[in-house]
Amino acid sequence: MEHAHEHEHHPPITLYYKVFGALIILTGITIAVAFQDFGVLNNIVALGIAGIKTTLVVLFFMHVKYESKLTKLFAAAGFTWLAILLAFTLQDTETRRHNPGPQGWATLPKDIVHPAPAASAAHQNEHAAPTGEHAAPAGAHTTPTETPPAPSSTH
């Protein structure tokens, strides 16, 4: 009885070093690309480089290149399914309105003070209600010449 793995192809060790070198170079390119702004192509460029690195790993380090057609078919089906999932995910995330979120601490509405215009500030001071226990109720209009009525005592 023959061994089933006798026809197996073993690549030379130098090929593994070449693939490793290519992966290191592609990793350097990935780092360089991360600091560039390609606009809407940022994700596409990053995923393209990652796809090339993944293909190298699957073909050479996982030996799919030297396997049967059925193994290659299943590997291709896995990549196809991954491409479908990534396409739908990117379609969803890239078509949303991007909201960067709050910048620092958000102020509470009670903390927001709106400055009064300079011309009307003096006008408001002329018609300000007196302070103290005899202050006019909110919304009542009094002039500075008016005085509140004196309390009456009936002793």
Image (cartoon, rainbow, N blue to C red):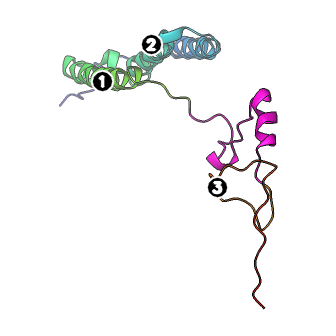
- Identify the secondary structure beneath mark 3: loop
Under circle 2, the secondary element is: helix
Task: State the residue at coordinates (72%, 50%).
Answer: 142
Question: Mark 3, mark 1: which one is toward the viewer?
Answer: 3
Where does residue 86 sit, x and y in percent of width and height?
A: 34, 23
Closer to the camera in the image, 114 or 149 = 149
Q: State the residue at coordinates (80%, 28%).
A: 118
Does 69 appear in magenta? no
Q: Which residues are magenta?
A: 101-129
For marks 1 and 2, the one nearer the N-term is 2
**Which residue is denoted by mark 2 in the rendering?**
44
Mark 2 burial class by Cα count in 10 Å: few <14, some 14-19, many 20+: few
Disc number placed over residue 88 in the picture, else none:
1
Query: Picture coordinates of residue 52 (x, y %)?
Result: 44, 13
Label 1: which secondary element = helix
Q: Which quadrant of the structure image shows residue 26? A: top right
- For label 3, count other residues whose C-alpha is less than 10 Å away and answer few (under 14), some (14-19) or many (20+): few
- Residue 122 colored in magenta in the image: yes
